[in-house]
Amino acid sequence: MKICHACQESYPDELLICPKDHSHLYPAMEIPAGTVIRGKYEILEKLGEGGMGAVFKVKHVHFGDV
């Protein structure tokens, strides 16, 4: 899965450019701190990574829960 940092949408790995705004797509394992996903979850830090994916510490933007 890839993420567009401009519109925060997720897309399949085959795409390189966001179809909505033509921004570069980044692999989900490389999401930088401060990125807000789906308008709800702010990435605080990457906790770990393995063969099947990555685990991130996030904060819910509206509720403030970590």
Image (cartoon, rainbow, N blue to C red):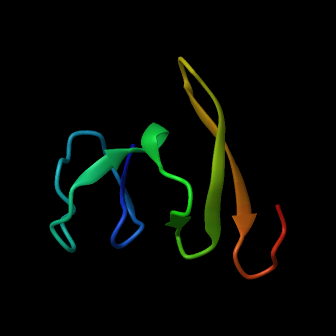
Residue 21 vs residue 55: left or right? left
Residue located farthest toward the top when viewing the structure as drawn: 51
Residue located farthest toward the bottom when viewing the structure as drawn: 62
Residue 65 vs residue 33: left or right? right
Q: In x, y percent, where is residue 57?
A: 72, 49
Query: Can you say whether 52 is above or below 62 in the image?
Result: above
> Which residue lies at the image location 15% right of the left edge and 67% below the top edge?
22
Q: Quadrant of the C terminus?
A: bottom right
> Which residue lies at the image location 37% right of the left edge and 63% below the top edge?
5
Displayed quadrant of residue 23: bottom left
> Which residue lies at the image location 56% right of the left edge and 55% below the top edge?
33
Q: In x, y percent, where is residue 18?
A: 22, 62
Displayed quadrant of residue 1: top left
> Which residue lies at the image location 62% right of the left edge and 65% below the top edge?
42
Residue 5 vs residue 43: left or right? left
Q: In x, y percent, where is residue 21?
A: 20, 73
Q: How many marks?
A: 0
Q: For this rendering, which residue is in front, 48 or 38? A: 48
